[in-house]
Image: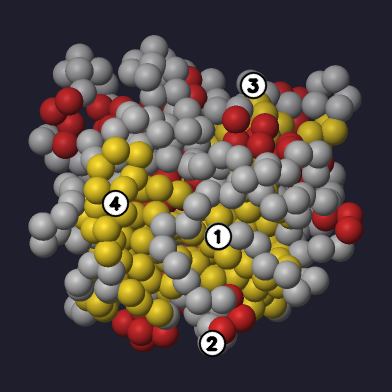
Amino acid sequence: MTDSRPATRRTVLAAAIATAATAAVASSAAASPLSAAPAASRGGSRDGSSVDYHGWTSAADWRSGTGQGTRVAAGRRPGVAIAAPAGTTDYTDPHTRRTATWEYAVWTSPVHRLPVPASELVASWNAHTPAGTWIRIEMRGTYTDGTDTPWYTLGVWAAGDQDVRRTSVDDQGDGKSSVWTDTFAVDDTSTGLRLASYRLRATLHRAPGTDATPTLWRLGAMGSDVPDRFEVPATAPGVAAGVELDVPRYSQNTHIGQYPEYDNGGEAWCSPTSSQMIIEYWGRKPTAEDLAWVNPEYADPQVCHAARFTYDYQYSGCGNWPFNTAYAATYRDMQGIVTRLDSLADAERLIRAGIPLITSQSFMASELDGAGYGTSGHLMTVIGFTEDGDVIANDPASPSNEAVRHVYKRRQFENIWLRTKRYDANGRVRSGTGGVCYVLFPAHVSPGQRRALASVGIC
């Protein structure tokens, strides 16, 4: 019904019981010491929040970083692209075992100092990767004790799956922190150690001798230090009471047994199914040519398409958070980020502005009336609020498209989404996501939507 693996790795993170890996991924290009870079000045933090999202998107942002072989691609949607390659590198795809030589160029962000030192960080990016190109996203941080992390790989990514297989990288750690699929986490938060600052690095690759180039439109990260909590404060109905957005409804269960090579088929496709709902809400969808590979007997082939092109070959699932937001940005003028929100009041500001969101939560069946199931990890789409402030959600874990719309009690939903700790059916302590969500929206939004995004720290 749902994909349990994201919650499993959150359990490891929240309990701080993971054994740090002994080796870090080799960086793809040399970089100057972290302390040498100028500090970034524009952030997305909110007063009183332990969550900070910071993104680089404008021409000025791209010029503020350090490039090796890159250029700023001007236009309505500025980005970073390859100018003249900085060199060549060999890459052996761990999933196909093919080794190939690639030209590359590197863009490194300025240092971003976190307003509240973080225990976790999740990067997300939006890019165009035509055939014969791909990107690697990395992070290096400075701890509050003044020492630096290694360069951690947070994703090897391409929109397609013919040149390289998009993948997270396991076994990264330095004895103080580790990377779990898409999330950097301090291993033992009880020591007080936190991440004080970071920089991100994007390495753009292309086949030698071609003019093709990836273009990176958005690069950012959410750093957070959400406190351990089984219960969160209740909020009263707010600005979105009585607002419901007209979001398409798709059931993941329609696809049970289809394309089992992508995480055992639809029973685990809550994340791409939710992503596809919002992509189509914004008026985008795959073309007939895009869908030509899907069995024509299958209903809603775009959901199969989303599963294939969000699939993480290392994680063996479709629930990699930034891979879903990057997939959304492969559609015309779309973008997406991974962040955390502090309350349902934040979600209401987005809904009021016409922006639905995808939330990640875990719960027992008794904790969410009307769901009819329990899950250790599940994504669903928040599309509105009733007049009484209850949550209207398109829940893909439904038997049919017609059954996808649900109304969940505000207090129950708020708690299962925002808590960081919970008990399972056996009384054991497990983790919650602490308000993780995807926000997918057009590159060019209305002034009101821009203000709503800014109000929840999205720049």
Instruction: Please name the amino acid that badge 4 sits on.
Output: Trp
Q: Nearer the viewer, residue 384 or 438?
A: 438
Q: Position of residue 38 (x, y in %)?
A: 53, 87
366 displayed left or right of 30: right
Q: Position of residue 213 (x, y in %)?
A: 19, 61
Proximity of marks 1 and 2: CB atoms separated by less than 8 Å: no
Q: Which residue is mark 2?
A: 38
Q: Which residue is mark 3?
A: 373
For label 1, count other residues whose C-alpha is less than 10 Å away and answer few (under 14), some (14-19) or many (20+). Answer: many
231 displayed left or right of 307: right
Instruction: Determine the CA span between mark 4 and mark 3.
Output: 39 Å
**Residue 221 lies in quadrant:** bottom right
Residue depicted at x 23% and y 36%: 162
The answer, for residue 40, to whether it is visible in the render is no
In the rendered image of this protein, does residue 69 appear above or below residue 192? Answer: below
Residue depicted at x 61% and y 40%: 171
Helix, strand or loop at disc 4? strand
Q: Earlier in the sequence, mark 3 or mark 1?
A: 1
Q: Position of residue 5 (x, y in %)?
A: 60, 30
**Residue 28 lies in quadrant:** bottom left
392 displayed left or right of 273: right
Q: Earlier in the sequence, mark 2 or mark 4?
A: 2
Instruction: Please name the amino acid that badge 3 sits on.
Output: Tyr
Proximity of marks 4 and 3: CB atoms separated by less than 8 Å: no
Instruction: Please name the amino acid that badge 1 sits on.
Output: Trp
Q: Which residue is mark 4?
A: 134
